[in-house]
Image: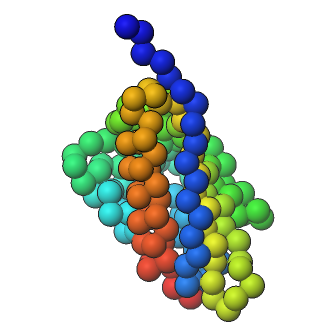
Amino acid sequence: MESKMKQTSVTVVQKIQAPVDAVWETISAIGGVDKWSGMIKTCRVEGSGAGAKRFCTMTDGGELNENIDLVDHEKKVFQYSIPEPPMPIKDYVGTMKIKETGKNGETEVTWSASFKVEESDESEMRAMLEGAYADGITGIGQVSVA
């Protein structure tokens, strides 16, 4: 039986108590993911800005290699892709957008991704990514101080 890949997406929106400029500094630095993501043990970067490559070792020992596709300092949008994800998905493109909420020191972070997944794996992959994004946004808030 031939497997069928389905295009899907995941979005997590969370408000954190950290100034927008500090949050953007954390995200746009490209490296340092291991400081705010509980899933990443080590992270190294080759290059800078769009075109850079990020090589991460996950806490379970897996390798996660990412291409940095967009770092828009004006709009505060960061986009990356994972050419060979260590999970049963393909064509993964992740986007992080941040904006001030208007409340003192509060920032809204939107972390989304689009990808193809086997229909049988969709709910598991969506739940895993939603949890990872929520934990990551919380971690960004903890390391992004004025």
Residue 87, position as x, y percentages in the image: 36, 36
Residue closer to the observer: 78 or 13: 13
Please name the colour scheme applied to the rendered image: rainbow
- Give the residue at the far right of this rendering: 74
Number of dots carrying numbers: 0
Residue 111, position as x, y percentages in the image: 57, 57
- Give the residue at the far top of this rendering: 1
Residue 31, position as x, y percentages in the image: 46, 59
Which residue shows up at 46% across the image and 28% down it?
A: 119
Q: Is residue 90 above or below residue 78?
A: above
Residue closer to the observer: 106 or 25: 106
Which residue shows up at 55% across the image and 59% down it?
A: 12
Residue closer to the observer: 34 or 109: 109
Q: Is residue 126 above or below residue 122?
A: below
Instruction: Say if residue 84 shows up in the picture.
Output: no
Which residue shows up at 66% across the image and 61% down it?
A: 97
Does residue 108 appear left or right of residue 85 in this picture? right
Q: Is residue 19 above or below residue 36?
A: below
- Give the residue at the far bottom of this rendering: 104
Residue 23, position as x, y percentages in the image: 58, 74
Which residue shows up at 63% across the image and 84% down it?
A: 106
Instruction: Say if residue 60 shows up in the picture.
Output: yes
Q: Quadrant of residue 3?
A: top left
